[in-house]
Amino acid sequence: MSPNAIKVTDGLQKAGYEAYLVGGCVRDSLLGLSPKDFDVATNATPEQIKATFRNCRLIGRRFRLAHVLFGREIIEVATFRGHHDEASSEDKKGKQSSDGQLLRDNVYGNIQEDAQRRDFNINAMYYNPSTQEVTDFAGGIDALKSGEFALIGDAETRYREDPVRMLRAIRFSAKLNMRIEPSAADAIHSLNHLLSNIPPARLFEEVLKLFLAGKAVKTYELLQTYGLFGVLFPQLQPLLQDSNSKETLFLENVLENTDKRINNDQRVTPAFIYAAFLWYPLEERTDQIIQEAGLSRYDAFMMAQGEVLHRQVQRIMIPKRFSTVIRDIWILQQRLPRRFGKRAYQALAHPKFRAGYDFLLMRGEVEGGELLELGQWWTKFQHAAPSVQKTMLSSLRHDGPKKHKRRRPKRAVSKNND
Ligand code: ATP
Ligand code: MG
């Protein structure tokens, strides 16, 4: 367990509170996996937690908790949650929507109640570092042994309270290679649409966790099985009906590649994944705009980018720092075929060249033909000696794919179409 997490439980216990490590870190440690992050549960209120640590800030409205900061490591500390009774559901601490969604979950309780409020039995184990004991409130250890985990309580009620639990079920099933207990699995089929009630900002984080855990292929298959993928990516879903289409193959390719990179400790930017998920919707929309409005391909492409992103962020918020990179990757797909003059060197100097080039290679893999050749050209060009680069560029003039363009008088070559 993280030494910093133990500093937190020790600190709270010394101040007279109960404190345990809980959730994924206990689960993963018991499975022999290394935990991604460490969560602490305590009977101290957020204010009392803040008073105990200097390096602490309080966050969250729907679910208030404390972050204790140790350089780059953040230990999340939550006060034990309690049950929402009729009276408390209307006050400031707890709030429920008419369809059962918990809009606020700040009703505090004791450790037994806290365990009941957690999502799955494998996530309701508490570890006390000072006694080195695990308290298992909901049969988590048996679940880990059997390879099947369950929701705590009635499946429909628990998914209605928080539809994100459906995504979490998929995530844990893929990550831990465990089955979802049948009643918890079945309920997803009928409640998957509730995911559209979740604020886009919260879904951004959840979706990242789904696809950046090294099990994106498996996760994607499960999301499709349970009808959740289309709720998250409504523009892409209609293009995935045929399992042999380029759209499907491209997506599978990108997911496999993401897993490979993560399992090799290579960086994956969320922007790449979103750029890929929205690429064919973007092409489709570009074609529509050309037909409807008679714009040039370039203008239509630029307009379609805005529209496709706008529609996506109705479901999943995409922070600006990523959406600008998504656009960079897309625009590079327009620029990489145009190599004459200084253009190839300018593209190479683009800060997102690498992502754009990787993206092009993946398109080439599924589409073949000119795209594949173009990818190969760039593979060679970027590492070639300057003299070879020059030769590569000048030979483009003699046998490049765009021969017909060069016969046009120079003045007539449009800025965006050469
Ligand atoms: P990991 O950190 O590996 O993604 P985790 O189980 O630790 O998995 P966190 O999101 O870190 O997931 O949450 C910590 C714990 O908080 C969970 O194990 C669970 O007990 C509880 N929890 C998190 N989200 C929910 C939720 N939506 N509903 C109920 N309990 C939750
Ligand atoms: Mg965790």
Image: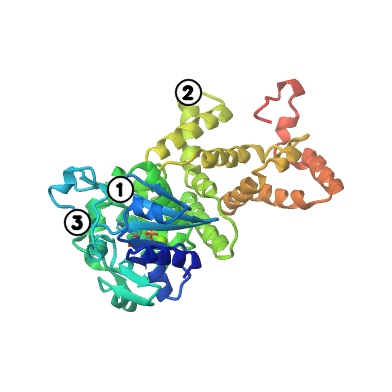
State the image coordinates of residue 324 (x, y, percent, origin top left). 55, 38
Few, some or many C-alpha atoms within 10 Å of disc 3 (few <14, some 14-19, many ≥20)? some
Outermost residue to the right: 387
Q: Position of residue 313 (x, y in %)?
A: 41, 38
- Label 2 is placed on what type of residue? Ala
Q: Is mark 2 within 8 Å of ligand 1?
A: no
Residue identified by numbered label 1: 195
Query: Which residue, given by chain and number where applicable, does mark 2 sit on?
Result: 293
Specify few, some or many for label 2: CA neighbours under 10 Å numbering under 14, 14-19, or 20 or more.
few
Ligand 2 shows up in the quarter that is bottom left
Q: Position of residue 86 (x, y in %)?
A: 12, 49
Mark 3 touches mark 2? (CB < 8 Å): no
Percent from the top left, x then y, of residue 383?
77, 52
Sequence-wise first label, 1 or 2: 1
Residue type indicated by callout 1? Leu
Provide the residue designation for mark 3: 83
- Front-most of residues 255 and 414: 255
How crowded pointer 1 is (Cα within 10 Å; few <14, some 14-19, many 20+) is rated as many
